[in-house]
Image (cartoon, rainbow, N blue to C red):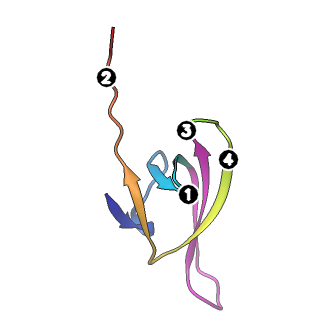
C-alpha cells in the first residue's frame, strides 16, 4: 500500500531498496531553504542493520502489512 511519507509512523514496515525495513525513529525537518523532508532511522528485518534515510514530504513510500501465523 503506497502512502505519503508524512503519514508513516514508528513501527511501520516499509519496502525500500528491495528489502523490508522497520521504522525506528522519524524526524520531520523544515529547513528555511529548500523543501521539507523526513529523516528516518530504519532497521532491516532480516539482517538487523540500521540505515538513516531522508524522504521528501511529498514522496510516496510502500508500506507493508505483515501477518503472523503459527505452523506445526
Q: Which residue is mark 1?
A: 17
Q: Nearer the viewer, mark 4 or mark 1?
A: 1
Q: Secondary structure at mark 3?
A: loop
Q: Which residue corresponds to the image point at 56% horizontal and 86% vertical from the top-left?
A: 35
Residue range (magenta): 24-45
Question: Which residue is disc 2 drawn over?
Answer: 69
Q: Which residue has dot 4 on it? A: 50
Q: Quadrant of residue 39?
A: bottom right
Sequence order check: which comes first, mark 4 or mark 1? 1
- The reply, left or right, for residue 19 in relation to residue 2 is right
Secondary structure category for the residue under label 2: loop
The mark that comes first in sequence, 1 or 3, is 1
Which residue is the site of mark 3?
A: 45
Crowdedness of circle 1 by 10 Å Cα count: few (<14), some, many (20+)?
few
Quadrant (top left, top right, bottom left, bottom right) of the N terminus: bottom left
Is residue 29 found inside the magenta-colored segment of the image?
yes
Instruction: Answer with mark 2 or mark 1, whichever residue precedes in sequence.
Output: 1
Labels 1, 3: front one? 1
Residue 25: x and y in percent read 59, 52
Verify CB contact (< 8 Å) between mark 3 and mark 4.
Answer: no
Amino acid at each position: 500500500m503506497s502512502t505519503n511519507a508524512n503519514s508513516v509512523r514508528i513501527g511501520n514496515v516499509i519496502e525500500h531498496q528491495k528489502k523490508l525495513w522497520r521504522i525506528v525513529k522519524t524526524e520531520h525537518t523544515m529547513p528555511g531553504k529548500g523543501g521539507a523532508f523526513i529523516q528516518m532511522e530504519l532497521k532491516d528485518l532480516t539482517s538487523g542493520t540500521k540505515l538513516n534515510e531522508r524522504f521528501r514530504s511529498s514522496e510516496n513510500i510502500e508500506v507493508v502489512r505483515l501477518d503472523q501465523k503459527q505452523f506445526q
